[in-house]
Amino acid sequence: MDNTVSNAIDHLAEQVSSSTIDEPLLIGIHTGGVWIAEILHRKISFNEELGTLDISFYRDDFSRVGLNPQVKASTLPFAIEDRNIILIDDVLYTGRTIRAALNEIFSYGRPASVQLGVLIKRTGRELPIQPDFTGMELDLGSHQQAKLYQHDGILGFGVDEVTAT
């Protein structure tokens, strides 16, 4: 894991560990959020298995990007009704991914609370969604994109220039 990602995960883990959430369930959003959630799940003693969400069918941008051909199954190995959830994603940008994840979660039941943890909080929010736990913050322009990647089991991140289509 590169040092920047490692430091951000440590910072995120410290915040989650010091929270006063009663017996939280940890859920990662595919794909990068699951990578981060797996590491957090190992670093912090959670009582329950890790849950994973695929939000492909709740996205609102099908007309622009099409249906994701690599749909993964959501796995929630626990009942979420009246439970406290910590939802983990890699990058918080517009807020639309989190909105879709909340729709998916509520299709399983009604949790007592949902708190959001992200590795990278960047500028450019379109929806009123903010994280409760943040690994690091980036001030990026609308033509830039922060992306978490995994290569040979090593996590890293980069900032790419995005060209208009």
Image: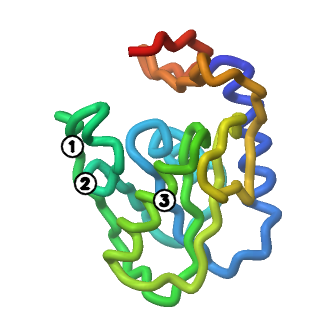
Q: Against 10, is 21 above or below?
A: below
Say which residue label 3 marks.
99
Please state the horizontal and vertical placement of residue 128, each as a whole percent of the image: 66, 59
Query: Residue 32's mark?
Result: none
- Residue 105 seen from this side: yes
Residue at left offset 62%, top offset 78%: 23
On the picture, is 165 further left or further right than 37? left
Q: Are marks 1 and 2 in contact (CB under 8 Å)?
A: yes
Mark 3 vs mark 2, CA separation in Å = 12 Å
Q: Secondary structure at mark 1?
A: loop
Residue at left offset 35%, top offset 50%: 60
Residue at left offset 30%, top offset 61%: 75
Instruction: Tell me the crowding category of disc 3: few under 14, some 14 to 19, or many 20 or more residues within 10 angstroms, Cα based.
Output: some
Q: Secondary structure at mark 3?
A: helix
Mark 1 vs mark 3, CA separation in Å = 18 Å
Query: Depth check: 10 or 138 in front?
Result: 138
On the picture, is 132 further left or further right than 156? right
Quarter of the image where the N terminus is located: top right
Say which residue label 2 marks.
57
Give the quarter of the image for residue 125. top right
Q: Earlier in the sequence, mark 3 or mark 2?
A: 2
Query: Depth check: 64 or 51 in front?
Result: 64
